[in-house]
Amino acid sequence: MIGDAIAGWIGNRIDRRDGEGGTLGALAGVLVWKATRKVVPAAIVLGAVAYGAHKLSRRRNAQA
């Protein structure tokens, strides 16, 4: 909830720089925040899995 408010405020400030309203920027900021909250943990998990697979592959190649 607080993150949504902060993201909306930041988006509003960015959108006001062009001299027009800041509503579209506020909505964009909130949508980016919500997407980031879902994508970043998934990217961390996928990165950890890829790193583990890489290490396993190197161990198997070293034994052969």
Image (spheres, rainbow, N blue to C red):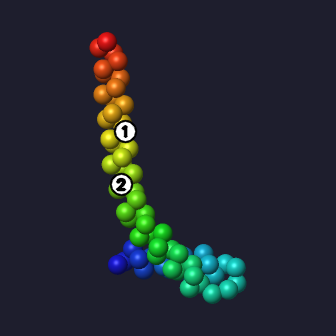
Q: Position of residue 6 (x, y in %)?
A: 44, 76
- Amino acid type for the residue under numbered disc 1: Ala
- Name the mark on residue 50: 1
42 and 22: which is toward the camera = 42
- Amino acid type for the residue under numbered disc 2: Ala
61 and 6: which is toward the camera = 61
How far, Cα to Cα, is label 1 from label 2? 12 Å
Q: Position of residue 56 (x, y in %)?
A: 30, 28
Q: Categorize mark 2 by other alpha carbons within 10 Å: few (<14), some (14-19), many (20+).
A: few
- Identify the residue shown where x is 43% and y is 66%: 35
The quadrant of the picture occupied by the N terminus is bottom left
Q: Position of residue 25 (x, y in %)?
A: 57, 78
- Displayed quadrant of residue 23: bottom right
- Name the mark on residue 41: none
Q: Secondary structure at mark 1?
A: helix
Q: Categorize mark 1 by other alpha carbons within 10 Å: few (<14), some (14-19), many (20+).
A: few
Q: Is residue 21 above or below residue 14?
A: below
- Identify the residue shown where x is 31% and y is 12%: 64
Inspect this view and state whether residue 13 appears.
no
Of all residues shown, which one is farthest toward the top? Answer: 64
Inspect this view and state whether residue 61 appears.
yes
- Identify the residue shown where x is 42% and y is 80%: 5
Q: Secondary structure at mark 2?
A: helix
Which mark sits nearer the N-terminus, 1 or 2? Answer: 2
Q: Position of residue 54 (x, y in %)?
A: 36, 31
Of all residues shown, which one is farthest toward the right? Answer: 19
- Identify the residue under disc 2: 42
Q: Give the side of residue 25 with respect to residue 54, left or right.
A: right
Q: Is residue 40 above or below residue 12?
A: above
29 and 61: which is toward the camera = 61
